[in-house]
Structures are given as structure tokens and as C-alpha cells.
Image (tube, grey):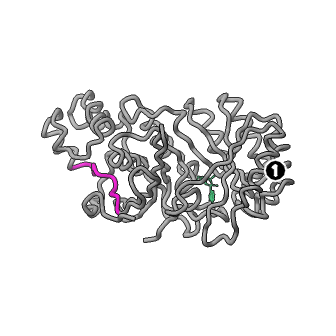
Amino acid sequence: MDDHPVHPPPPESSGLPLLHNLTCSEIESWMVAHGTPPYRARQLWQWLYVHRCRDLARMTNLPATLRNQIADAFVTDPAHITETQGVEGDTRKLLLRLRDGEQVESVLIPAENRRTICVSCQAGCRFRCAFCASGQAGFRRNLEPGEILAQVLSACDLWQQPPTHVVFMGIGEPFDNYDAVLQAVRTLNDQDGFRIGARRITISTCGMVPGIERLAGEGIQVELSVSLHAPNNALRNRLMPVNQRYPMEVLMPACDAYTRQTGRIITFEYTLIHNLNDGPECARELARLLQGRPARVNLIPLSPVAEFPHAPPAPEQAERFAAILTEARINSTLRLSRGCALDAACGQLRYRPL
Ligand code: SAH
């Protein structure tokens, strides 16, 4: 572990809004309102997201008076890395301190041809899935769009280039902070932004049906993952309280409608928990549930979480589960969870109260 601060300590919160919370057209309106030609907005935008510059003094193609006006109205430095764990080239966990002192975690996952960042979208989580660390300390607040982007900017600093993939699988529920997440996604995808292809951006939901319905109408080709974890209501209710609000007879038709409307296949996440949802009968029930549905299943062995006294399955048990799905012609992959040693694996990211 190296826990050196990568940046100087964060400045006290000035109460000013974060520049990275604005869309390019909002910056344009601001420019016009401040007597500046609208083309300046695109120049500023490129400084922020192509050059990933937080220092107004370096934005030398913008007039000094404009830079002063921006400095008087906005914060340009959205977050600071207060801690990094792990070593370069391997999975690393970042702790980011936001302007009000809240802290969130992100995970950088390098692989041969890709650089993936797993981002958080909320400080804490309301959904309290039994097996997930993120909601154990409750919910504090939504992240602003710029605070989601700040995590990606930190990854750019450490990697000295943008990630190739972004997954919304850190702390929080993306559809419980829908607008900020979608705005961040659009900036990640923007040709003058991070230029990350929509299909390389994954939103993972615990099954908030209104969000699935809204995303279907966005006309954006992001990947959608739905955390299922159980093949029936009785078991899913035990693991995921959200199932009482959006039970499977509501969730599955919403997923079908999403696929019909977008032509996109949904990935169902299924965390395998020893003696709880990893038996052959669960595998067969899952296969029946997904039969005839264009779907993919990601099987993830449980990552240990202190508050949930259960274990992952033995490897043979996990393989048996996967084999039953394969026999039923359901597409599945058994994922090796990375980052366990750092408590940086799926479901281990934790909100740390102030
Ligand atoms: N709220 C979103 C995204 C965050 S969790 C969602 O629920 O999908 C990202 C993924 O990690 C989800 O599939 C989640 O169910 C899974 N996960 C949570 N806790 C886990 C654990 N202890 N072991 C393995 N996977 C876990």
C-alpha cells in the first residue's frame, strides 16, 4: 500500500459550483450571459476534457478577463485523491475527497488491452443489499456530475491517458441519481470529451424499473447490467430489499421492453453465495427464467463483506452452476473477481462516514 497524497490537500469548500457540473451548452449560455462569444465554451470544454486541465492559468487561448470571471464563479478542481492502494499496473483503489469532505472510492482495473475504471455515483447507498458493503453505513448524498467525472479525471492522471471502459459499479445506485449519471455518461461519450464509446460504458442497476424505462428512451447505446442474484422473489427479497418495490414480475418485463426498444442485450449479474443461491436447483430456475430471453449472465463469486456471514462457493460448485446454464443454452461467464486483496472487488467498496 502506498498512501501518499497525489495532490496537495483539498482547499476548503468555497461554496461555488463545480465547473465540471456544466454541460457544454450550459457553459455556452454562461459565456453569453457574461458578454463572451459562445465559441469560447468549446475551447474551455476542450481544456477540461481533452487536455484535462484544472488550472485556468494554463488556458492561454482564453482571455485573462474571462479566466478571472470563471475563477470568481466556479471551482475548477473537483476532487482530490487522498489515498491510493495497490501498485501501478495492477488493480488499484482510489479514495477521493470531495469538496464538502465526503469521500468515495473508485477502482482502476488495467488489463492487457483495456483500462477500466469502476466509478461511484453516490456517497453511500439507500438500497442495502444484504451482501454489499456499500449501503451498510447508509446514504449520504448523490454525487454531482462533475464529481463522477472527477473520478475519471483522476484515472487519467494516474494512467496519463483516459480509460477505455467505464463501469458504474462502484458505490451507489446509478438510477437513484439518474440525471447526474446520464450527464456524466454524455461527457464521457462526447467527441470533444473523453471520447469513450457508449458501448464501453456500463450502467449497473439493482433493478430500479423506472430507470430502466427511462434509459430505454435515451437513444444512447450504453451497456446495461441488472443485478439479479436470485431466480425467484422469495430469495431475491431476502437478498435485495429493492425486490419488494420492483418484484421480478415487474422487473423482467421491463428488461424485455428495454431489449425490444433498444435492441441491446442486458447482462444479468448473479453473485454466487455458498448454500444460498448457488445450488443446481437455483441454476435450473435461473435458466427457466431466462429461457427465450436474449440475455447474458455474469456469475460473480461472493466477495467477502464483514456484515454478511457467508462464503463464496467452492470453484467446482460455481462451475457446476455455469454448466447448467450452458446446457440450457444460456450465455454465461464465470468472472474472477479482481481486487479482493484491496477490498476493491465487487460489493466491497464502502462509504466511509465523515
Ligand atoms: N447499485 C448497482 C451498482 C453497484 S454494485 C447495482 O446494484 O448493480 C455492482 C455489482 O456488484 C452488482 O452486481 C452488485 O450486486 C455486485 N455485488 C455487490 N456486493 C457484492 C459482493 N459482496 N460480492 C460480489 N458482488 C457483489
Task: Please tell me how many numbered marks the rendered image carries.
Answer: 1
Considering depth in this image, is 27 or 223 the residue closer to the camera? 223
Which quarter of the rendered picture does the C terminus lie within? bottom left
Q: Residue 292's x, y, as percent? A: 82, 34
Considering depth in this image, is 287 or 217 the residue closer to the camera? 287
Which quarter of the rendered picture does the N terminus lie within? bottom left
Location of ligand 1 given as a quarter of the image: bottom right
Query: Outermost residue, left direction?
Result: 64
Q: Name the residue rendered at 75%, 50% in the picture.
A: 319
Q: Name the residue rendered at 17%, 39% in the picture.
A: 66
Amino acid at dot 1: Ala
Horizontal side of 114 relative to 77 (left or right) equals right
Instruction: Give yes or no for residue 80 being in the magenta stretch.
Output: yes
Q: Residue 250's x, y, as percent? A: 77, 46
Give the residue number, with chain letter if any, for mark 1. 283
Q: Name the residue rendered at 42%, 63% in the picture.
A: 103
* Callout 1 crowding tier (Cα within 10 Å): few <14, some 14–19, many ≥20: many
Task: Provide the residue span drawn in magenta.
Answer: 72-82
Q: Name the residue rendered at 78%, 51% in the picture.
A: 321
The quadrant where residue 129 appears: bottom right
Q: Residue 183's x, y, as percent? A: 46, 41
Asked if 66 appears above or below 275 in the picture, the reply is above
Horizontal side of 311 relative to 163 (left or right) equals right
Q: Residue 170's x, y, as percent? A: 52, 54
Instruction: Give yes or no for residue 224 being in the magenta stretch.
Output: no
User: Is the CB of mark 1 within 8 Å of ligand 1?
Assistant: no
Considering depth in this image, is 68 or 347 the residue closer to the camera? 347
Horizontal side of 201 relative to 326 (left or right) equals left
User: The residue tagged with tag 1: helix, strand or loop?
Assistant: helix
